[in-house]
């Protein structure tokens, strides 16, 4: 049903000329697409560039069947393009993994369902990320500028890609010979990427209403199927019992306090993990930062996007992981990359479970889907420790 949310957002912009970030689809009560939408009373909080692409596609025809085919055709096209790009990149980075890495992406069941069947736009997000990497491999100044522009546009498609711009700018300045210019070199690259992110937002900007619409994404009450929801539920229980045990005044809201504690802790954890990626990239010097160090950049991108999904993004849906999975297919295989590939399969349990588990108990779903790869990591690590320990 997510594809109909995108179609309706495009129709609201191109046909009804209302803001889908603020006005809920149910406001347009006579539109025939409403009956297919999973959440007609919630605004479409997509990235601005994707909203504009939706408006372009939805404005081509008023026939529902053709519009659905356009969106699904775009999903299929991006999937095929990503297969070709992953093949080309692996041929340059890890030729020995070219076939394996390409097939791990092309035949991934989550990716096939979400891109080919459901037409999610995360395939387009991954396409721009892969084109950025391919452009960077040209190792020219103009190619670096083009890569920053592409990352800015990618972030305008999906806010998750915003974490890539600072990491890439920091990665590039490691090749600068004069350390005194590092700060300014970093700033202009970061500014260019952020500017390209903001430009598509300008036509949709309505001041405070747009800002509040996007910041509402951090609301844990609507954070279905997120790992944070699994943690926040017992924290709410502890806070509620604490209030009752010590007979605190009823004006104290244990639910809000619990959510604030979880949010603050998650943001702090993300800040530490994200900052660690800059520390890893700082080890690069000279030409190593422009050629041999690229796998380390991809690893930092994958880690940054993954931890943003875990600690920040609400609500969480399985298709959000597609850009991360695409980067995983470009890396050497270890415990973490295998765990992420396993996660892409365990996330498929979300769809049948959400039909049998009520929303009030939805925190059980991420406990299962994320618990399976977590158990794998613990088992693999315990075996490694067992091998290293003296007999």
Image (cartoon, rainbow, N blue to C red):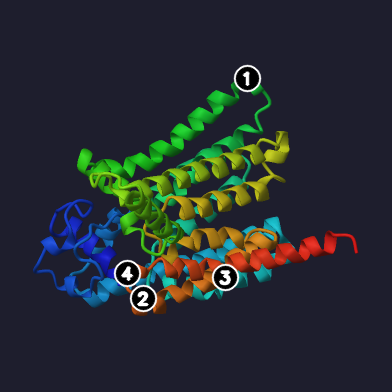
Q: Position of residue 296 (x, y in %)?
A: 66, 47
The secondary structure type at the circle numbered 3 is: helix
Residue toward you, 256 or 289: 256
Residue at the spot x=62%, y=68% of the render?
375
Task: Tell me the residue that label 2 is attached to.
Answer: 357
Position in image of residue 112 (x %, y %): 48, 74
Return the residue nearer the eye: 34 or 135: 34
Between the residue at mark 3 and the residue at mark 1, the CA separation in whole angstroms equals: 47 Å
Neighbor class of circle 2 (other Cα within 10 Å; few <14, some 14-19, many 20+) is some
Q: How far apart are marks 1 and 4 (CA)?
A: 54 Å
* Dot 2: element: loop
Q: How far apart are marks 1 and 2 (CA)?
A: 57 Å
Q: Nearer the viewer, mark 1 or mark 2?
A: 2
Q: Residue at x 59, y 45 (%)?
A: 136
Place of residue 258 in the rendered image (x, y in percent of width and height, measured from the top left): 37, 50
Label 4: which residue? 359
Does dot 4 land on a helix, a strand or a loop?
helix
Q: In this view, which residue lies farthest toward the right?
A: 391
**Number of marks drawn:** 4
> Splitting the image into 4 quarters, where does residue 100 fall?
bottom right
Report which residue position mark 1 lands on: 180
> Closer to the observer: label 1 or label 4?
4
Q: Which of marks 1 and 4 is nearer the N terminus?
A: 1
3 and 2 marks in contact (CB < 8 Å): no
If you read the primary sequence from the N terminus, does the residue marked by circle 3 or circle 1 appear first? 1
Looking at the image, tell me whether mark 1 or mark 2 is earlier in sequence order: 1
Number of residues whose C-alpha sits closer than 10 Å to that of mark 4, classed few (under 14), some (14–19) or many (20 or more): few
Q: Can residue 146 be seen in this view?
A: no
Give me the C-alpha separation between circle 3 and circle 4.
Answer: 21 Å
Q: Name the residue under label 3.
A: 372
Disc 3 or 4, which lies upstream in sequence?
A: 4
Q: Nearer the viewer, residue 76 or 224?
A: 224
């Amino acid at each position: 049903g997510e594809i109909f949310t995108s179609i309706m957002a495009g129709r609201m912009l191109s046909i009804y000329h209302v803001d889908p970030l603020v006005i809920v689809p149910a406001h347009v009560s006579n539109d025939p697409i409403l009956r297919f939408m999973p959440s007609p009373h919630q605004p479409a909080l997509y990235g601005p560039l994707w909203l504009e692409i939706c408006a372009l596609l939805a404005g081509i025809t008023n026939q529902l069947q053709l519009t659905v085919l356009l969106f699904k055709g775009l999903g299929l096209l991006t999937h095929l393009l990503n297969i070709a790009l992953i093949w080309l990149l692996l041929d340059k980075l890890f030729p020995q993994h070219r076939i394996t890495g390409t097939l791990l992406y092309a035949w991934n069941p989550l990716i096939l369902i979400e891109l080919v069947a459901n037409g999610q736009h995360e395939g387009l997000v991954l396409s721009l990320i892969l084109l950025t990497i391919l452009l960077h491999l040209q190792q020219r100044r103009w190619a670096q500028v083009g890569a920053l522009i592409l990352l800015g546009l990618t972030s305008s498609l999906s806010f998750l890609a915003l974490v890539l711009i600072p990491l890439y700018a920091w990665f590039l300045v490691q090749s600068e010979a004069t350390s005194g210019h590092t700060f300014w070199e970093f700033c202009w690259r970061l500014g260019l990427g952020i500017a390209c992110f903001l430009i598509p937002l300008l036509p949709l900007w309505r001041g405070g209403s747009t800002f509040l619409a996007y910041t509402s994404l951090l609301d844990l009450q609507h954070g279905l199927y997120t790992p944070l929801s699994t943690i926040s539920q017992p924290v709410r229980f502890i806070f509620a019992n604490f209030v009752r045990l010590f007979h605190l005044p009823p004006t104290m809201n244990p639910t809000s306090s619990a959510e604030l504690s979880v949010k603050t802790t998650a943001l702090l954890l993300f800040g530490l993990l994200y900052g660690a990626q800059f520390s890893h990239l700082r080890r690069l010097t000279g030409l190593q930062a422009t050629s041999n160090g690229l796998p380390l950049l991809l690893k930092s991108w994958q880690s940054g996007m993954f931890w943003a999904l875990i600690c920040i993004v609400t609500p969480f849906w399985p298709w959000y992981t597609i850009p991360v999975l695409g980067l995983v297919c470009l890396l050497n295989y270890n415990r973490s990359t295998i765990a992420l590939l396993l996660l892409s399969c365990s996330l498929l349990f979300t769809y049948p479970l959400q039909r049998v588990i009520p929303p009030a108990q939805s925190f059980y779903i991420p406990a299962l889907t994320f618990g399976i790869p977590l158990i794998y990591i613990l088992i693999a690590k315990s075996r490694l420790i067992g091998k290293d320990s003296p007999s």
